[in-house]
Amino acid sequence: MKAIRQIGWVATLIPILLACDNYEMPPIIPQTGAALSSPAPGSSIVLEKDGADEADIEFTVTAADFGTTGTVKYQLQMDLAGANFAAPVDLGAESESNILAVNVAELNEALLAKGLPFEVASNVDFRVKASINLPLAPIFGDPITLLVTPYDATVAFPVMYVPGDYQGWDPANTMTVLYSENFDNKFKGFVHIIGGSREFKVNEGPNWDVNYGDTGADLTLDRDGDNIKVKDDGTYELNVDLGTKTYTISAPKRWGIVGDATAGGWDADTPMDAFDKVTNSLKITTDLKAGEMKFRANNNWDFNFGGSNGELTAGGANIPVAEAGNYTITLYFGAEGVATYTLTKN
């Protein structure tokens, strides 16, 4: 019986083996990605700030071939030259047309976000991503490199001026201002009220023509009203709604430096008690050890900043101090949550 069963298995395998010998792989359908035909590789593009929101740059593409019929759409992608599109940025809108229009302001923003300097020509890689309305993977055309010069996109926010005893009652000081980041008559910023009477006002211009105080201390702004006054030294976040003539002011924060490079180590802040009205920054001159430091408020970790190369982020990395010595340190807060510092050995 065993022999019969074995012969039966062999008989069963023979047609399978013969079928394997005759098996043919399905044909491979060639596919061709969409190429950029214009601008030509190596072309130079200088982006212009004037009218950038309404201006477009047109990229012309050749048709992609998926080896089958369907609706093909194209998307322009950009990345830094030599980055192999590790983090590509999609530009413009996906389109069935062979003309891809990219807004100048959008392209400029993408270039600056990649860290390219403005007013400097830099090599940038572009390619086309093609997709089809079938269960097939997208295909990418060969990249080209263009020399692109972005413009300075620094936004000039509307401002309100904050003259006070802390900065010499100078309404023309363009550093001690609040910013309307959404251009909506709502202004915010940080005011370092340290020393003196701790009184201030908010002005619409760099003069006393239109100034507001708070008569009655009810958080309502009054034209030519009484000086606004706070009780304690510190850094205050001030928000002004010019439309409703109201304002809010935060509890004070006392900023200092902390870390094994500082006198108090990681346990106690060394206060930054000096205010530089010219640069609107807090300042301290002190001895530091070789080690690390951060900026911290109110002697706890609820509000702390770290970073490198003069740039700070909330909760950022410890700042290295390479060698012991006497240093002058500044801390600055600007629009859109920007925080920077300087660390200068004397």
Image: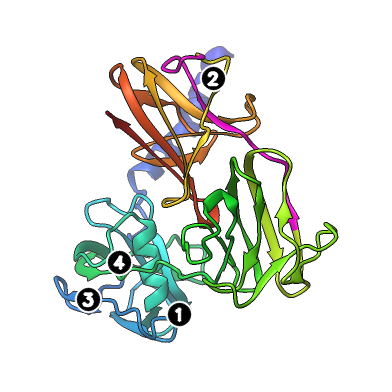
Q: Which label's residue is closer to the chain start, 2 or 4?
A: 2
Instruction: Find disc 1 in the rendering and name its residue.
Output: 95
* Residue type highlighted by circle 3: Ile
The residue beneath circle 3 is 45
**Dot placed on the residue nearer the N-terminal end, 1 or 2:** 2
- Decide if residue 75 is in sight here: no
Look at label 2 and name its amino acid: Ile
Judged from the image, the secondary structure of the residue bearing numbered disc 3 is: strand
Residue 191 at x, y = what percent? Answer: 59, 50
Quarter of the image for the N terminus: give it.
Answer: top right
- Which is the main secondary structure of the residues drawn in magenta? loop
Q: Secondary structure at mark 2?
A: helix
Q: Toward the viewer: 263 or 19?
A: 263
Relative to 108, say whether 325 is above or below.
above
Between the C-alphas of marks 1 and 4, the distance is 14 Å
Q: Earlier in the sequence, mark 4 or mark 3?
A: 3
Disc number at residue 260? none
Marked residue nearer the N-terminal end (1 or 4): 1
Segment colored magenta: 248-264
